[in-house]
Image: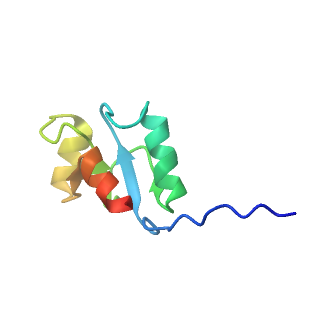
Amino acid sequence: PNVVLEEIPKTLNGKTFVVTGFVNHYKNRDELKADIVTHGGTVVGSVSSKTSYLINNDINSTSSKNQKAKSLNVPIISEDQFLEMIH
């Protein structure tokens, strides 16, 4: 018999995320990345003009990813804001 898994809404379909910095709600960044994929999103390693969101709990970080996101007008969101998107 086929076990039907509960259908997880693909709320992040077509969205691309870059994850950087520390995480609070997940054990590690890989768990957060897995959650993005589960909800239909894509995780990439570097920020580009195609990136939908940069997830970084330190919004004011001067990291290269943050600076690039700002220069490309890519929204930088916290983990909390990400969790609101999927719940």
Q: Left of 27 or right of it: where is 75?
A: left
Residue 16 spot, x, y in % from top left = 41, 59
- Comparing 61 with 47, the one in front is 61
Quadrant in which residue 12 is drawn: bottom left
On the image, the x and y values in percent for residue 32 come to: 43, 43
Q: Residue furthest right?
A: 1
Q: Residue at x 35, y 37 (%)?
A: 25
Left/right placement of residue 49 relative to residue 45 reads left
Can residue 48 be seen here?
no
Where's the C terminus, which quadrant? bottom left
Give coordinates of residue 44: x percent, y percent: 45, 49
User: Is residue 22 placed above or below 79 in the rendered structure?
Assistant: above
Quarter placement of the N terminus: bottom right
Residue 51 visible in the picture = yes
Residue at screen point 22% across, 47% down = 68
Up the image or down, 84 lies above or below 60; here it is: below
Who's the residue at 33% across and 52% down the image?
A: 83
Residue 11: image location, x then y, percent: 43, 68
Q: Who's the residue at 12% across and 39% down the image? A: 60
Q: How is the image coloured?
A: rainbow
Count of marks, rendered view:
0
